[in-house]
Image (cartoon, grey):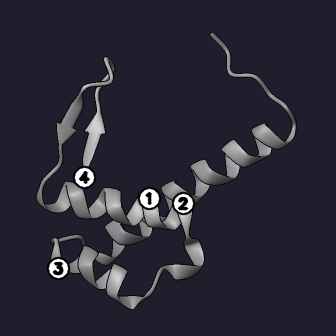
Amino acid sequence: MDSRDERGAAAPLHGADRVLIAYALKLTRAPREICESDVGAMRAAGFSEAEIFEAAFVTAYFNYTNRVAEGLGVEPEG
């Protein structure tokens, strides 16, 4: 798994970063498929219960706001 920088170049992810991004992507793309093993992977990567909650909350929040904006036809500023 990789992330793209501002130029679009791939930046490799490792360890806890990789687990966090995999969790956020799964929660975004297939939320009904999130299960205890996904949360367990976050714990195993060293995330606390509060950090796991924050990851879920922030991911869900941005998914929500993006869908509302898209649903209303809001164009990004800039």
| Mark before the other along the chain sequence, 1 or 3 | 1
Dot 4, how many residues are within 10 Å of its Cα: few (below 14), some (14-19), or many (20+)?
Answer: few
| Mark before the other along the chain sequence, 2 or 4 | 4
Q: CA distance from mark 2 to mark 3?
A: 21 Å
Q: Residue at x 75, y 22 (%)?
A: 75
Q: CA distance from mark 1 to mark 2?
A: 5 Å
- Identity, as a three-letter code, of the amino acid under mark 3: Ala
- Identity, as a three-letter code, of the amino acid under mark 2: Thr
| Mark before the other along the chain sequence, 2 or 3 | 2
Identify the secondary structure beneath mark 3. Answer: helix
Residue 28's tag is 2
Residue 44's tag is 3
| Mark before the other along the chain sequence, 4 or 3 | 4
Q: Residue at x 54, y 60 (%)?
A: 28
Seen in the picture, residue 43 relative to 18 is either above or below; the reply is below
Judging by the rendered image, the residue that carries numbered circle 1 is 25
Q: CA distance from mark 4 to mark 3?
A: 18 Å
Using the rendered view, name the quadrant where residue 5 is placed: top left
Identify the secondary structure beneath mark 4. Answer: loop
Q: Is residue 35 left or right of residue 62?
A: left
Q: Is residue 45 left or right of residue 26?
A: left
